[in-house]
Image (tube, helix red, strand yellow):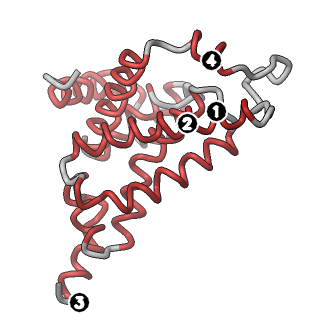
Amino acid sequence: MTKQDSTKITGDTAQMNTSELVEACISGDGRAWEILLERYQRLIYSIPIQAGLSRADAAEVFQTVCIKLLRKLSTLRDQTRLAKWIITTTSRESWRLARRRKNDHFSAPPPDAENPYDLSDIAAALPLPDEEQETIERQQRVRESVEALNERCRRLITLLFLTQEEPSYEEVARQMQMPIASIGPTRARCLEKLRKALDGKI
């Protein structure tokens, strides 16, 4: 690859789909690797947190998965295979670390710090493994479809449905720089685009 080709890849990475990002990573584009991790870091972190691990442990799982992913990229060019590999690998690393913490008599701080951490309790509270994986994969497909929308729709849907703050229409109108009366119709159009993007995926 020439220096000119490499520069072009780096400049266009934000618009690349996952398969193109993987190819750019394999070609040595560091910016592509950063964006790839940005797209999947929420998915990776969510799995150990759902398994009851602390944020520090989730960070450890994240680092382990990233190292393994870097070594495995050349065989994960397909976007569907990549998401499934990440979910499976992260789940295994989360349970491996949870078992190790239990064997070391270490209690990872749960959401309610007054309750003791117990792997069997977590397992009982979580869905069955197949159901859990299907749910996580479905959530990831939704996130990827939202990311594929145009910037206006992506920002609006994120503000309305994907933030914990649940901003008011006044705040949404301010951030989007649009009249409040336009939010409803624009939301409907964006949701229709998202529905079409998700058709057959969930």
| Numbered marks: total | 4
Residue shown at the point (20%, 54%) measured from the top left: 77
Q: Is residue 36 above or below residue 10?
A: above
Of callouts 4 and 3, the N-terminal one: 3
Could you say which quadrant of the image residue 8 lies in? bottom left
Residue shown at the point (73%, 24%) measured from the top left: 111
Of callouts 4 and 2, the N-terminal one: 2
The secondary structure type at the circle numbered 4 is: helix
Looking at the rendered image, the disc whose residue lies closer to the viewer, 4 or 3, is 4
Q: Which quarter of the image is occupied by the N terminus?
A: bottom left
Q: Is residue 37 left or right of residue 23?
A: right
Q: Position of residue 62 (x, y in %)?
A: 54, 49
Q: Are marks 1 and 4 in contact (CB under 8 Å)?
A: yes
Q: Residues within 10 Å of mark 1 (few under 14, many from 20)?
A: many
Residue identified by numbered label 3:
3
The disc labelled 3 sits on which kind of residue?
Lys
The disc labelled 2 sits on which kind of residue?
Ser
Q: Is residue 62 left or right of residue 176?
A: right
Q: Which quarter of the image is occupied by the C terminus?
A: top left
- Spatial separation of the CA atoms under disc 1 and disc 4: 10 Å
The secondary structure type at the circle numbered 3 is: helix
